[in-house]
Image (cartoon, rainbow, N blue to C red):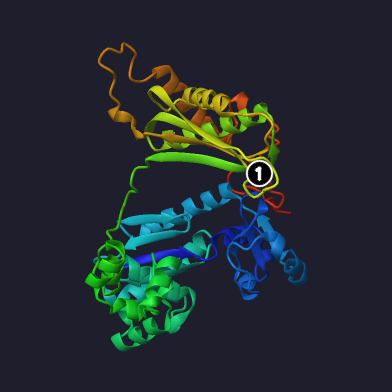
Amino acid sequence: MPVALVDCNNFYVSCERLFNPKLEGKPVVVLSNNDGCAVSRSNEVKALGIKMGEPWFKMERIAKQHGIIAFSSNYTLYGDISSRVMATLATFTPRQEIYSIDESFLDLEGFPAHTLQDYGQKIRRTVKRNIGIPVCVGIASTKTLAKLANHCAKKNLAGSEGVCDFGQINESARKALFQSLPVNEVWGIGRKITESLNLLGIETVEQLRTADADFIRTRFSVVVERTVRELNGIACIELEQAGTPRQQILVSRSFGMPVVTLENLNESVTYFATRAAEKLRKDGSVANSVCVFIRTNPFKINEPQYERSIVVPLMQPNDDTAMLIKAALFGLKHIYLPGYQYKKSGVMLMGLQPKGVMQGELFDNMPVTDEKADIRMKAIDAINRKMGRDTIAFAGSGTRRSWTMRRDRMSPNYTTRWDELVKAS
């Protein structure tokens, strides 16, 4: 079964360039929460030797020297652009697996093999024309090989020009290509497994491909064994059209500045519970318990440290934001201790199940669902989707939110807020 992996190039940076063409050709980096580390780098930044995850404070000198332009992560913008890219990719195949915010597998079964290279180029042109985001396409007989082909397309190996179809490369050329690639370029082969493989003399993709699969399973796991078989064209990882239902939903952020008061912690927990509830309803699920946690900054070794969490069970599985907030604040009250500088809080919804299969208790006269709450939540969700997040919000989440993470370099929400649309002059 031929499968393609389509991956957006330097996705966060590409989103920033989409509405600011002056950034083309310039070194651009997007930073993580609280403007901490590099999470997306333009090719110009990569050429300067700046690694993924490099802290901003370490690269500031180089940034000034080379004119690197830094942006805070704008996840609302990136998520919206991602949905547009994925919708466009869905038009090229009847089966699609959205693997991440910037990657998607496409089932190409039934397409003539000799046309796949051209089809990949068509995908690239269409996404670039319709959305403005550059992508690369890797095509092969398994998902692991497609990921590797995508890497070759990005690096322009084997004259790929943004599309690499392993089916169009003869066996000897493919063997030479695999021999030139380090084993850690294989999907799922991380640092620790790479070190262990190297000790066995397996340093390249070709050496892993030709290794004995049964021996690899004995020394590592069935997962690595499947990787070996996939490298040999034996499909072991199925294409998933729908993701596995989530078992939990976590919303958490580090604060932009230390938080010391229960009032500010209440605001943060209320806000996080609200976001988690929105995701819960979007999935069509309910939760049967709420976990809330708080912690100080573990890197401040000279300050008193405190970390605590608590799970609050619900009387009934629920998706009502008000009920989830109430449970979260109840838990927070029991774990909060004054006198500490808190750096992070979070809310996790647990015990998720489909809303349509909720079961009541035998001796419980309460209805399984609250119709009024359902109507209220649907109305709030609809208004916030149409008019923008927090058009209607719970007062407990605050208005100033001094605790929010630092994003001093964030670009406008060009596609999701009317007041931040691009203005033509």
Q: Nearer the viewer, residue 375 or 72?
A: 72
Q: In which quarter of the image is residue 190?
A: bottom left
What residue is at 68 percent from the left and 69 percent from the top? 26
Foreground of the two, 419 or 55: 55
Residue at mark 1: 405
Left or right: residue 311 compared with residue 402: left
- Residue 281: x and y, percent? 42, 33
Give above or below for 377 relative to 14: above
Q: Position of residue 335 (x, y in %)?
A: 56, 28
Q: Is residue 254 left or right of residue 367?
A: right
Can residue 64 be seen here? The reply is yes
Task: Give residue 394's quadrant in the image.
Answer: top right
Amino acid marked by disc 1: Met
Residue 182, above or below 224: below
Residue at 51 percent of width and 63 percent of height:
129
**Location of residue 353 with respect to 376 vertically, above or below:** below
User: In the picture, residue 370 is in which quadrant?
Assistant: top left
Q: Quadrant of the N terminus?
A: bottom left
Q: Where is residue 243 in the image (x, y as percent from the top left)?
A: 35, 48
Relative height, residue 367 to residue 396 (above, below)? above
Indicate left or right for 13 with 212 as reference.
right
Callout 1 secondary element: loop
**Foreground pick, 273 / 101:** 273
User: How crowded is the residue under tag 1: few (<14 C-alpha within 10 Å), some, or many (20+)?
Assistant: some
| Residue 137 at x, y percent in the picture | 42, 69
**Placement of the C terminus among the 4 image quadrants:** bottom right
Can residue 2 be seen by looking at this rendering? no
